Image (cartoon, grey):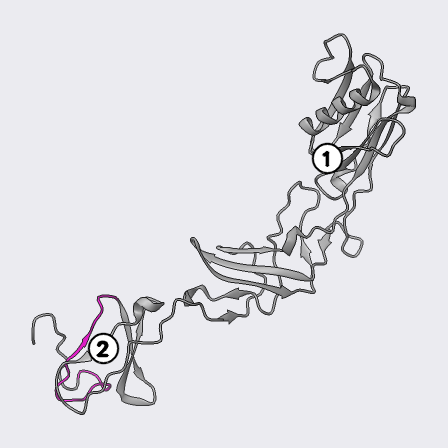
Amino acid sequence: VGAGNIDVPIGITTAITVSSLRVLINSNRNITAITDPDDALKLNLTHNEAGEDGNETITKIEAGAVITVTGMSGGSDTPTDHIRDYRRIQEPSDLDLWPPDIYDPLTPATGYVRFLGSVNPSDGELVVIGDGTDTVTFEFESSGGVGGGNVEVTIAGTAADTMDNLKTAIEANLDITATIDTGSSDPKVDLENNTSGVIGNVAITTTGVQIEINGMNGGGAIWRDGGQVPYLPIQDVMVEATLGSRRFYDETYQYNNEIYYDAGVAGAALVQALNLRRLIMDLAAG
């Protein structure tokens, strides 16, 4: 045979029975050849490199009507909608599942601290606040120096300014959003735990006579049949499949079952097992 050509002797397979076959496939990549189940004299070729790179021309280089060639063609860089029916997939590789718009139905714990009568706290008075992970003792101080481990809150010239100092100290030391309540007649800071759920229900305490406290409370979770595992009754779940930096699939599905996770852990990820009839694109198609 010629240099670089493939010699196919007569009778080497039942699929090729022509007396002389020389076909040039313009590709240096792997190709899968399978005899057509409906035509023993036809060889079906599939390029193992998906996409437009597989559209290599097949050329017949010997005359003769007995040989016909088609392709390679049909490869596309646009993913097709190949969907498999997967069950109980947990933390699949290269697959992100999340509710759209960071949907979070859990209720955050809330509370507040107020200076009654717009009276400044006294030197050394304390307010203790926790976010479910850390608990911090804030000490009001006018002359400098606080107890070991306490966070200093400087007593300013007005109660409103002191409340501003407390707000700043809370947000610097706890995972809590502190907002000055401008509608309150007395200086007041409203608190909201940034980690939703029962984890934020940590009672606020104080030694201050003129300091009113409330919370933290109201943080909630939805419980499964009164048991210990909360769940999210999510209606829309977004499915995105990626391979490296390439995105293959991005679609939102209706979902009517339950996603279980641990609401007692701050930042718990929603990468648990899902039962979806349509879930993941066949990455092999990409």
Amino acid on which the number 2 mark rests in the picture: Ile
280 and 27: which is toward the camera? 27
Q: Residue at x 63, y 60 (%)?
A: 237
- What residue occupies the far bottom of the structure in this picture? 65
Range of magenta residues: 12-29
Query: Is label 1 in a helix, a strand or a loop?
Result: strand
Q: Which residue is label 2 attached to?
A: 58
State the residue lying farthest toward the left. Answer: 2
Q: Earlier in the sequence, mark 2 or mark 1?
A: 2
Q: Quadrant of residue 149?
A: top right
Q: Residue at x 79, y 46 (%)?
A: 220
Disc 2 crowd, CA 10 A, few/some/many (<14, 14-19, 20+): some
Q: Is residue 19 magenta?
A: yes
Residue type, mark 1 in image = Thr
At horizontal 72% and vertical 35% (from top left) the residue drawn is: 177
Task: Please provide percent x and percent y for residue 266.
Answer: 66, 40
Query: Disc 1 marks which residue?
Result: 177
In the rendered structure, the answer to whether residue 12 lies left or right of residue 267 reads left
- Secondary structure beneath label 2: strand
Screen quadrant of the C terminus? bottom left
Residue 46 rendering spot, x and y as whole percentages: 31, 74
Nearer to us in this view, 193 or 132: 193
Name the residue at 76% across, 33% down.
179
Q: Is residue 28 left or right of residue 136?
A: left
Q: Is residue 233 above or below residue 69?
A: above
Is residue 62 a member of the stretch shown in magenta? no
Nearer to the camera, 148 or 248: 248
